[in-house]
Image: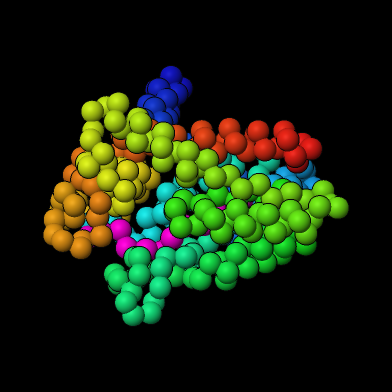
Amino acid sequence: MRRLVLTTVALLLGTVGAHAQPATPPRPPPVFIDELTWMEIRDRMLAGTKTIIIGTAGQEQKGPHMVTGEHKYVLTHTTERIARTLGDALIAPIITYVPEGSWETPLGGHMAKAGSITLPEDRFIELLVHAAKSLHAGGFTTFILIGDSGGNQNGMKAAADQLNAAWKTTSARALFIGDYYTKSTADIRTYLGGLGFTMDAIGSHAGMVDTSELLFVNPALVRRDRLAPSGGFPESGVSGDPTKATAALGKALVQIKIDNALAQIRASRATSGGF
């Protein structure tokens, strides 16, 4: 009788074990400050995290096939990877109000398409400076400025220059990481050209590159039924051939951005007194 009971228990336990779900791996601690309480941010800084990434992304048209927040979704992915690789950095909320052209007639840049939002260059610089000074007041000392859009680059450099001039007698430093965008743009074209793609196919906006990156980081935000060379019609907002985009390409292109940013960050830290 005792053997029968033990056998029955063993069978029941085996059945339960067979249907048990695998344990979900623990989620790593957040690196975006808007996912942390102020005390959690303070404690991370006390433990040595004094670096904050300020990323900028355009709210702009991305052709008929991609959501207007494409830059934000890509930058959310890349800055998280950068912060986790550095190990001592947090990330400020992504800034999506950036220079995109004019709202006056005639409309300039991406402003001719619905959903785009622009900010004048001087206001953009002022926004960055105030954001960094706010975070500095809370204890951060190293500020990494990264932009996922071409129109952001000059303003981010100007903001970094202003901050460094204001902080020249302190330990605070602002690092403009232009290689994330400028060097990566050239490297990506070289990489895709080496795979046999023409410059016309690669394009310059909402084409292979942007579409591949979004297919990798958030494929649900690409309207695959609307993919067409040059957007499929005149003035579509697309330069290039997004039908040639793939998530596999996107993974490689995103990694180029991350690697270039990390290399410049490490080099900049080394020449900025270790900050």
The quadrant in which the N terminus is found is top left
| Residue 20 appears anywhere in the view | no
Q: Is residue 168 above or below residue 17?
A: below
119 relative position to 197: left or right = right
Residue reaching furthest to the right? 169
Q: Which residue ends up furthest to the top in the rendered image?
A: 3
| Quadrant of the rendered image containing residue 47 | top right
Q: Quadrant of residue 64?
A: bottom left
**If the image is split into quadrants, where does the C terminus sit?**
top right
Disc tally is 0
* Residue 88 appears in the picture as rendered: yes
Q: Residue furthest bottom?
A: 105
- Residue 183 appears left or right of 30: left
Does the magenta portion include 54? Answer: yes
Q: Residue at x 81, y 52 (%)?
A: 168
The residue range painted magenta reads 53-64
Q: Is residue 222 magenta?
A: no
Residue 11 position in % (x across, y down): 37, 26
Residue drawn at point x = 56 percent, y = 59 percent: 155
In the rendering, at what x and y percent does residue 189 appear? 34, 36
Q: How is the image coloured?
A: rainbow
Q: Residue at x 62, y 38 (%)?
A: 265
Left/right of residue 38 with respect to residue 191 in the rendered view: right
How far across and how far down the image is residue 62, in percent?
30, 58
Residue 265 vertical position relative to residue 55 in the rendered view, above or below? above
Q: Who is closer to the viewer here, 137 or 236? A: 236
The residue positioned farthest toward the front in the image shown: 106
**Majority SS type along the magenta span:** loop
Residue appearing at x 58%, y 56% in the figure: 156
> For residue 267, which quarter of the picture?
top right
Relative to 50, residue 133 above or below: below
How far from the left and from the top, in percent, is residue 126? Answer: 63, 68
